[in-house]
Amino acid sequence: MNIVIIGQGAIGLLWYFKLSQCANNHVTLRCSGNVNNVPNSMTFTDSKQQQHQQILTLASDEHLQQAELIIYCLKAYALEQAHQQYQTFFNKNAALIFSHNGLLNVQSFDVQVNSDQAIAAMLMTHGSLKNDNFNITHTGEGKSDIGLIAGNIPEKRRIKLVDTLDKALPLVTWQKDIKIQQWIKLAINCVINPLTAINNCNNGEVTNKKFKQKIEGILHEVVMIARKHNVSLSLTELIQTVLNVANNTALNCSSMRSDILTSRKTEIDHINGFIHQQGLIYHISTPHNTALWQQIKKLETEYSS
């Protein structure tokens, strides 16, 4: 399969490496932002601490035109701009996959061509750590859920797509309705990302009793907003899910904490900020999520001004 990965972050390079290991795939990488001095190869450390090298092949406009599958591995705030930049190159049969934190309103994207193009969301639990530019470590095995969020995809192409991804980085599962999983992931991110970033701690610290009431407050607001989107979530189950994820990734550094520590822009606007904005739209008070959104924005301001 002809595949283009857009984005050279931890997840983008994880997919690039894994998909490149399959002889039937032709994989290229489109770097985002102003990336200078791209090396000839990337370094990949697997979950058993074995180090590997993989030749890097950069994606040209022609590669984009010929791609059967394009995987965006970008921050939520960068994805819409990148899609508008590249969409005119895609052929109508190419499947697009968006991998990011938070929620995006894909229907609001300025899609000028191929409005029926298959666009899927991918939710991952694999751990991938960026050690340096083009150097990552696969810190934890996980799974990926994929489901359509726009357009249509014939069954034969869907089966081929899932099979290709599953052979490279199992377990990959197709979801007929990805919406519930998106909201569950959003809820997890609303808790773990800002709390670890603000308190400068690993994920496991979120299970501390001192965060109990705050977690309940954050998730109660998520449940209320989700209901307005016709998604029914159990607060009790959601709390347990968040605690399980925090325990299972206890030693991990969340992506938002990593962004703060390295003075990068975070995805807070699409996580707690999304709940805040939806609260304004539906006249629902979201003090917990609003406070976290404001705190992270303040931290960003301190190093971006």
Image (cartoon, rainbow, N blue to C red):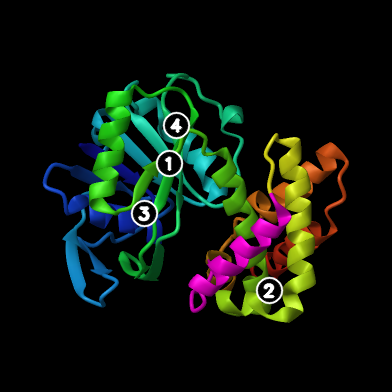
Say if mark 2 contacts mark 1, CB within 8 Å: no
Q: Residue at x 67, y 62 (%)?
A: 239
C-alpha distance separating marks 2 and 4: 34 Å
For label 2, the residue is 198
Tell me the amino acid under the disc marked 2.
Ile
> Mark number for residue 146?
1
Q: In x, y percent, where is residue 198?
A: 68, 73
Q: In x, y percent, where is residue 299?
A: 70, 69
Along the polypeptide, which appears first: circle 4 or circle 1? 4
* Magenta segment: 234-254
**Residue 190 lies within the magenta run:** no
Q: In x, y percent, where is residue 241?
A: 59, 61
Q: Is residue 61 visible from the viewing direction of this image?
A: no
- Which mark lies nearer to you, 3 or 1? 1
Q: Secondary structure at mark 4?
A: strand
Q: Is residue 132 visible from the viewing direction of this image?
A: yes
What main secondary structure does the magenta stretch of the protein show?
A: helix
> Mark number for residue 119?
4
Number of other residues with Cα within 10 Å of mark 1, as a class: few under 14, some 14 to 19, many 20 or more: many
Along the polypeptide, which appears first: circle 2 or circle 4? 4
For label 3, the residue is 12
Residue 247 horizontal side relative to residue 87, left or right: right
Say if mark 4 contacts mark 1, CB within 8 Å: no
Quadrant showing the C terminus = bottom right
Quadrant showing the N terminus = top left
Q: In x, y percent, where is residue 72?
A: 41, 44
Tell me the amino acid under the disc marked 4.
Ile
C-alpha distance separating marks 2 and 1: 31 Å
